[in-house]
Amino acid sequence: MPPLDALVARVRGEYGEMPGLRLTVSQACRLWQVEMPTCERVLEELVCEGFPYKTHNGAYIAVATSRG
């Protein structure tokens, strides 16, 4: 798995394990130990896919899903 794909999978996993996770880009960079441009790219890619969403103050929060 290419490094960026592995990071995307990791980010999805973190949000899946912690449903209330709310991170700014800076916080996400520290959590995942990646540089700002990479982190922004991953988060924006996921926003385009509909997971997570970006709040008006710049935090990224996972979209709630129903499990049934």
Image: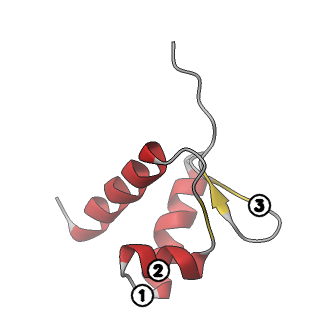
Mark 1 and mark 3: Cα distance apart in space = 21 Å
Q: Nearer the viewer, mark 2 or mark 1?
A: 2
Nearer to the camera, 4 or 35 = 35
Do the residues bearing badges 3 and 2 touch, measured as CB atoms within 8 Å? no
Going from N to C along the chain, the mark reached first, 1 or 3, is 1
Please give the name of the residue rendered at 32% of the width and 64% of the height, measured from the top-left corner: 7
Labelled disc at residue 29: 2
Q: Is residue 12 left or right of residue 22?
A: left
Residue 44, by quadrant, is bottom right
Going from N to C along the chain, the mark reached first, 3 or 2, is 2
| Percent coordinates x, y for residue 45 in the rendering | 51, 60
Reading the image, the residue beneath label 1 is 35
Relative vertical location of residue 21 with respect to residue 38 in this rendering, above or below? above
| Percent coordinates x, y for residue 68 in the rendering | 51, 12
Mark 2 and mark 1: Cα distance apart in space = 6 Å
Do the residues bearing badges 2 and 1 touch, measured as CB atoms within 8 Å? yes
Q: Is residue 56 left or right of residue 37?
A: right
| Percent coordinates x, y for residue 60 in the rendering | 64, 61
Q: Is residue 55 left or right of residue 66?
A: right
- Give the structural element (helix, strand or loop) at label 3: loop
Reading the image, the residue beneath label 3 is 55
The amino acid on which the numbered mark 1 sits, given as a three-letter code, is Glu
The amino acid on which the numbered mark 3 sits, given as a three-letter code, is Thr
Please give the name of the residue rendered at 46% of the width and 67% of the height, measured from the top-left corner: 42
Q: Is residue 18 left or right of residue 59?
A: left
Packing grade of label 3 (10 A; few <14, some 14-19, many >=20) is few
